[in-house]
Image (cartoon, rainbow, N blue to C red):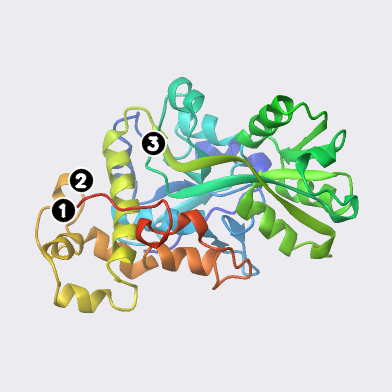
Amino acid sequence: MTSKIVTLAAGVALAVSAALPATAQAGDTLSAIQERGSLLCTGHNGSYLGFAEVDDQGKWQGFDIEFCRALATAILGSPDAVQIVPISWAQRFPAIQSGDIDVIIKVTGWTQSRDTELGLQFSLPYFIGPFYVMAQSELGAESIADLEGGVFCANAGTTVERVLADYLESNGIEYQPLSFESGEELRAALYAGRCDALAGFGPFLAATRVNAPDPDSLTIIGEVIQLEPEGIVVREGDDALLDVVNWMVSALLLAEQEGITQANVDEFRASPPSPTIERLLGVSPGVGERLGLSDDWAYNVISAVGNYGEIYDRTVGEGSRYKLPRGLNNLWNNGGLLYPLVLD
């Protein structure tokens, strides 16, 4: 199937939504995706380094983009059966509520207000995100308190703004907030010295520092101000799609746990070492029918994108330019917080 990558400017992303195939009402989105033959998935308005960015050939890449491709493969059998729609942080919720996109895969924090007030449902966490503060090295700050009175920058429309405000206010630290809708504008302001500090998602801060004209000019302070589970988002009532999302994430984690990779998945399928692997790879029938998919959906996903660890490594980990440690995003049996569900 030919890839349908939408490369639209952020400012017109929603304006062109009428030109995109309409989705069904909540509850029918999975069927609508199958009938349409493509998944409408979130990109970013510009680049969110390591997670959603456009390469020199104009192709989308990154951790979140790989999960969009994995979900498209699970539902439609091909990683190319996806339309990446550039959307800002603030636009993501109105866009899914209106049906302009099918799913949000955009390191979106699972919070109570979002879960209960926006008509949305969250998947099990697919990424554990710590929030830190990164400061101009010349300030010599060893703690966040040392930045008293400084200008703290953040991405507009994210939980970072609220988490930062809560943390600073609860610790009696006065500050000047400055928010930016565009990631490019935010980085430009930081690099130009308009921000004394930047609050954000740990991986984002590390990637921002790596890409700075002088990486040594920026220092990530070691205090974790919040730990946030990142979930994949569907509309309230889209239980069938949420089931697929949850089991897709679990399949990627289970594959890593069992040593199944993009390179050896065919060997495991030819000679499964356990009934669980038989079910995972569709050798035993039923694992797809329960979800409204083909029985080989997980096999197709692993063949297309690899396991969770492979995705992490090539997009933000040691195989990427960002080289972010797995940390809490390791599997449970390797010191992390992630684990697959029981596939019975």
Q: Amino acid at mark 3?
A: Thr
Percent x, y for residue 163?
A: 64, 32
Q: Which residue is mark 2?
A: 291
Looking at the rendered structure, the secondary structure element under dot 3 is loop
At 47% across and 35% down in the image, what residue appears? Answer: 110
Report the number of discs: 3
Q: Is residue 249 above or below residue 3?
A: above
Sequence order check, earlier mark of 2 and 3: 3
Q: Amino acid at mark 2?
A: Leu
For the residue carrying disc 3, how many other residues have a C-alpha within 10 Å: few (<14), some (14-19), or many (20+)? many
Is 193 or 289 nearer to us in this picture?
Answer: 193
At 51% across and 61% down in the image, what residue appears? Answer: 326
**Left or right of 264 in this view: 133:** right
At 37% across and 68% down in the image, what residue appears? Answer: 306
Q: Give the spatial CA distance, label 2 vs label 3.
A: 19 Å
In the rendered image, which quarter contains the N terminus? bottom left
Percent x, y for residue 183?
A: 71, 48
Are circles 2 and 1 on residues that touch, CB within 8 Å?
yes
Q: Amino acid at mark 1?
A: Val
Is 16 or 276 nearer to us in this picture?
Answer: 276
For the residue carrying disc 1, how many other residues have a C-alpha within 10 Å: few (<14), some (14-19), or many (20+)? many
**Left or right of 139 in this view: 265:** left
Q: Which residue is mark 3?
A: 23
Sequence order check, earlier mark of 3 and 1: 3
Q: Which residue is mark 1?
A: 287
Q: Give the spatial CA distance, label 3 vs label 1.
A: 26 Å
Percent x, y for residue 153?
A: 78, 40
